[in-house]
Image: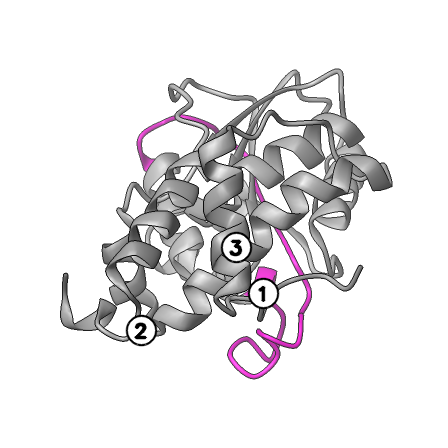
Amino acid sequence: MSDQQRTIAEGQWRQAELIWDYHLMHHELRPADVAIGLGSHDIGVAAHAAELYRAGLFKTLVFTGGNSPATVEVFPRGEAVHFRERAIDLGVPTEAILLEPNATNTGENIAFAREVLDDVGITPATVLLVSKPYMERRAFATARKLWPDVEFRCASDPLELGDYVKSIGDERLVLDMVVGDLQRVIEYPQLGFAIEQEVPEDVRTAYESLVRAGFTGHLIAR
């Protein structure tokens, strides 16, 4: 266990790793008509989207996201604006990027990005969703609910949980987010926000254990 992990019990860390792996869709990357980069606190999403663009996986990239309480200080001009600037710095041509600066949640990310594409006459059959690693499954479930006639694949920086924690620098924040995203995967289908996803019993047990242990900073109110 690394120094980054010492404030969290080893068993809890193993439970978080189990949930982390569940969040990953493990999709095989294929060329797509467009990519949608989902805004968040993690500027690494923009860097990974730029890497995938340079690899020739898509020609059009939409960055979507306004601000949340977690990002307003880090990205004062909005998530999508800062992500766009980062991608341009990494070699993505300005003309390849479309901007959606208003979304405040994942459903809006998908719906508003679709509107931006519609406005320029792009009707994709295949879309690559680029997100934080632990957001893959929730993003996929949301997109399939809102845009069912499109084939979605997910991509994120291929990091293990420990490496991701090091990149963010706040293990408690990351584990709260990992737990909170699983709560959304479980509960959002009942609210009409996402398609149903099977949650294995060991993943659900790990989630319940971490909630009891206090990793509740990103849970939605019931």
Q: Which residue is mark 1?
A: 79
Q: Looking at the image, is mark 1 or mark 3 earlier in the sequence? A: 1
User: In the orientation shown, which residue stands out farthest toward the bottom?
Assistant: 73
Q: Looking at the image, is mark 2 or mark 1 earlier in the sequence? A: 1
Amino acid type, mark 1: Glu
Q: Pointer 3 and pointer 2: residues touching (CB < 8 Å)? A: no
Where does the image place residue 126, in percent across and percent down from the top left?
59, 19
Please report the bounds of the magenta region as a residue range.
54-81
Q: Which residue is mark 2?
A: 169
Amino acid type, mark 2: Gly
Place residue 104 in its image quadrant. bottom right
Residue at 24%, 59% (x, y): give it.
10
Q: Nearer the viewer, residue 66 or 123?
A: 66
Query: For the residues marked 2 and 1, what is the alpha-carbon distance in whole angstroms?
Result: 19 Å
Residue at 60%, 32% (x, y): give it.
140
Give the class, few, some or many, for how many residues have Cα within 10 Å of label 3's Cα (few <14, many ≥20). many
Query: For the residues marked 3 and 2, what is the alpha-carbon distance in whole angstroms?
Result: 17 Å
Amino acid type, mark 3: Val
Where does the image place residue 117, in percent across and percent down from the top left?
73, 35
